Image (spheres, helix red, strand yellow):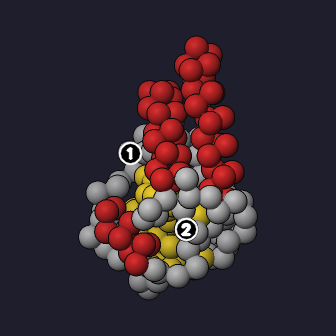
Amino acid sequence: MLLQSTTPEALTEFVEKCAAKLSGNPPIYVPYEQREGATVSGCFTNVRKAVEEEGGTIIYGWMLWELKGALIEAEHHAVWEKPDGTLVDITPKRDGEQSIVFVRDDSAIYTGKFIDMKRFAAFGNSLARTFIKVKGEVDALIKPYRAVGQYTVPPDVMAKAAPKDVRAMKLYRRLREGKRQ
């Protein structure tokens, strides 16, 4: 679950350390470029279609979101390398962001299966570590049922996951308030 994190304002030491845990490539800013027919959360389809229509290459990796002072969330993502070598993000964002921080990871190839977000707590933020642990428990429960796009989780599994998810949301609210423990 991507919460109300945003594109990191700067490529800080924390951002770079998180990127290094994802791949050997540095984090970079990639601009958004509107493309007709591209859909929110449809990066793999959006880029595949652009490559088919105009050439270029699909580049796999991670889009980084930051809740400043608390955590970084890495979301599996794809950007388009245009035939001229320019990288652009053609997938619109719900919040209208005009650039992303992207970490190329050639091992993060999209195979049709959902890949969980990766989360990293800011140094000394025990509340963020607790949030990440609880979200990991939720992810572990629903992972067998996950697919990209819509998916259905059996009611008995949702009954187990729901209280943990409620706890995670409460922890996240505290993180947004600037709490660290």
Q: Nearer the viewer, mark 2 or mark 1?
A: 2
Q: Residue 146 vs residue 178: left or right?
A: left
Residue 136: percent from the left, percent from the top? Answer: 46, 39
The residue at the far right in this view is: 95
The residue at the far front in this view is: 181
Q: Which residue is mark 1?
A: 111
Image disc number at residue 75: none
> Which residue lies at the image location 38% right of the left edge and 45% below the top edge?
111
Total of numbered circles in the picture? Answer: 2
Local SS, label 1: loop
Q: Amino acid at mark 1?
A: Thr
> Which residue lies at the image location 58% right of the left edge and 69% below the top edge?
68
Residue sitting nearer the eye, 162 or 133: 133
Q: Amino acid at mark 2?
A: Gly
Residue 37: percent from the left, percent from the top? Answer: 68, 61
Q: Residue 169 vs residue 29: left or right?
A: right
Q: Quadrant of residue 109?
A: bottom left
> Which residue lies at the image location 69% right of the left edge and 59% below the top edge?
177
Residue 77 in view, yes or no = no
Label 2, label 1: how far apart the Cα atoms are = 33 Å
Q: Which residue is mark 2?
A: 69
